[in-house]
Structure formats: C-alpha cells, structure tokens
Image (tube, rainbow, N blue to C red):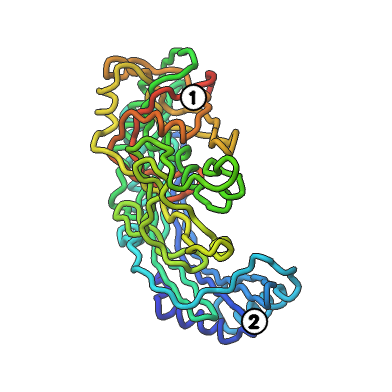
Amino acid sequence: MALITEAEAKAIIDRVLARSKAEDCVVYLNEGTSGNIRFARNAVSTSGSAHNTSLFVVSAFGKRSGGASVNSLDDESIARLVARSEELARLAPEDPEYMPPLGPQKYAVGRDWADSTAALDPDKRAAIAQIGLDAAKAKGCVAAGYLDHSDGISAMGTSKGLFAYDRSTAAGYSVTMRTEDGLGSGFGTTDSHDASRLDVAGVSRLAAEKAAASHETRAVEPGKYTVILEPAASVDLIQNILFSMDARSAEEGRSFLSKQGGGTRLGEKMLDERVNIYSDPMDPIGPATPWTGDGRPLERTSWIEKGVVKNLSYSRYWAQKRNVPAQPGPANFLMAGGTASTEELIRGTERGILVTRTWYIRSVDPQTLLFTGLTRDGTFYIENGKLAYAVKNFRFNESPVIMLNNLDALGAPVRVRNAETGLVSVIPPMRIRDFTFSSLSDAV
C-alpha cells in the first residue's frame, strides 16, 4: 500500500490547523505497515500484518493543553478531533512547564528508509523463517524465533509554521535454539533498517552451535572475572549511560552525573579514554528520524568523548530556565570500537567468561547506575584463547560506569537489537576486567 507522501501529509496537517481555534496547535500524523512471523518448536506458529493511520492533535490555551487522536482522515473526523482536543484543553489544569510549539525548522533528509524492508511480504517472511528452521534441524536443535518489520511515515506540523516529514523502515530477527532435552541454549539476533543486511543464516547457525555446546555445564564460583560481552549482552546495560544524560536530573542530584555539593560532572573524565559514545541520525548503519517529538532538529552529538562527558541534554523548558541551548536527547546509541571480531577477542583471552546475552536487568541504585540481571542462552569459560566448556548462568551486579573503566579491549561495532527499549544501537563486543557475578542461576 502506498504511504502518505510529504505533500499529502502537509495538506492533511494544514486541514487540521485550519480548523483550530486554539492559541497553539500541534498535529502529529503517522501511517505505517508492520508484519511479523513467529516460529516455535521448529514450526511456524503465527504470521500477520497490520496497517495503521493515526492523527493526534494537541491544542493549547495559555498553559492549558489537551490532546485527542483518531485513525480516520475525513473532514468530519478531523472536525470532531480538533473540537475534542480544544474541549480537553479548556478543562486541563495549567502546566507551569508548558512550552509553546516551535516555528519553522531546517531538517536533514532522513536515511532510515530501505526499499528491501518495505518489500517484505508473507512469502519473504516465510523464506526467512525457513533459514532459521533449517539451521536448527542441521544441529538437532529446537528453535523459537521472531521476525518483524515495518515501514511508515511520520509527520508533524504546528500553528507556528513548523512542518517535518520522515519515512522509515525497520526489520529485526531473533532466535533461541535449544537442545531437544532443553539443557543447552543459544541465542542470535540481527537488526537493521535494511532487511537485505539481516544476517539470518549467520546468527541462526551460531545460536544452534552454542546450544549444542552448552548442553553440559559446569558450576563456576561467582566472583570477579574477565568477561567478553557480545553486543546483545552489553547493549541493555550500557544504554543506561545514554539515558542518564539529562541535565535536569544531574542538576537536581538524581543521576550519576550529579556532582556532590551541587552542579554536574559535565567536562569530567569518567570512563576509559577509549570510550566514545555519540548519536547521529545520519549514521549509515543505525540511522534514525532526524527530528524530535517536539520538532527540534537532530544532529550528530558526542555524549562521551575519550571518556569525558561532553554534552548533556536539555528539555526546552529547562534550557530556557538555565538560559542555554535546548540540546535534544540522543536519536540512537552509537559506540565506537576497534576492528577485532568476537572470535579474535576470545583468542586474545587467557582466562575469562563469554556472555552471549543478558536479560531481566533492573536498577539497584540510579545514582551510581548499579544494575542487576542474569546471563542466559550460552555462557562459556575461556581458557588459553578457546571456549573450554559451558558454565552455569550467573546473576550479576554491575554498573556500566565501572565496566567502562575496567575496559580491556573493544571489537568492531555491529548493529544490535536493544531488547529493553528498541533504541537503534550500534556497539562493539568488548572485553571487561573484574565483572561482578554475585550468584549462580539455574536459568538455561
């Protein structure tokens, strides 16, 4: 189905704004198609697709605002939508932090669209799932996996003259392989805006190999170990650094970037000098929509450079209060690395533990970014540069800030699906010293 073009989106938003009687009005228009296929116990279990359109309007009178949405674009629906949002705005209490909408902005043309993803259909989904099923059968494993994809448009406009439009696509595949008795497990995932870049065969084969290799595990005493974290094992931990770059939280003493006695740690070296974390909506591997939900343009922003905190994000309200530029938050999570593969990092490790995946990560102390979680789906002891044997899974208690001060080596960055938040992420595998495992886990 053809998506709403930029010109059509502008015309729809202008129709909404023309009906508005509010002092301020912001219009969001989204349309998209999504599809998926799921398999379990070596057979496809479900497959489906959906097409949705949504129109959301926020009206404001002074500092009172209200929003309403519909999924129909005819004149009668739009008239009811605008009237409803204005009715709610008049009933709402004043928001002391309300900011009026932005006027015209300049945006880069997004790079987050790929025709290969938009062309996925039921037959192509089935063919991709078959690749995973073939890999399972080749190793005598039982597979459960999921492929999903989407293509769509996002547009917004304001009564002050702003208009923004972006087309985007996304595709992701993940698979868990188990031995038939359920004692061995392996995991693989691949993610891109461009479906032609998905390495379904590679991650499925590796997941099956890990399942077979982890069938018999040994219990290793918990403690501090050198670890190699595959990207799927570290992304959900390290992203918490990026989510803590908010200036207001730091200034109010609520984050790891708060300075004792007041102020922030902006400009301080807090991580290993090899750590460089940034965001860039134009990144060729992990592109993102080039504007924020309130219409601010997004550009390449360095958050951590050579271990030093380089920028903090500001809401428009907090920036006005502090009389500083309103730096938007990150559009994506990009971390620079080296050139080594995970296998090369393993070959360079005398003793350590390979972690394929972490899950169920929960906060313990937001001011030190201490988190707890579990390993799963393939944890191995490394000895003299080789995987020596599979080990029982662990619970860990660790802070990404401490981790990235105990950095030993970085591999080549790869795009990986962020299981907790869905944030587009490109990060390297890494070798970390003194990673803290606190107890054993019976999870497979």
**Residue 415 image label:** none
Q: Check disc 1 and report its element: helix, strand or loop.
A: loop
Q: Position of residue 387 (x, y in %)?
A: 31, 19
Would you say residue 399 is visible in this rendering?
yes
Residue at figure coordinates x 48%, y 22% from the top left:
393
Residue at figure coordinates x 43%, y 31% from the top left:
403
Residue at figure coordinates x 24%, y 34% from the top left:
340
Q: Residues within 10 Å of mark 1 (few under 14, many from 20)?
A: many
Q: Which residue is mark 2?
A: 22
Would you say residue 122 is visible in this rendering?
no
Q: Check disc 2 and report its element: helix, strand or loop.
A: loop
Given residues 348 and 366, the one toward you in this image is: 366
Side of 101 where 80 appears, left or right: right
**Residue 444 image label:** 1
Given residues 171 and 405, the one toward you in this image is: 405
Q: Residues within 10 Å of mark 2 (few under 14, many from 20)?
A: many
Side of 157 where 107 appears, left or right: left
Q: Position of residue 273 (x, y in %)?
A: 34, 37
> Which amino acid, by three-letter code, is at mark 2?
Ala
Side of 276 where 266 appears, left or right: right
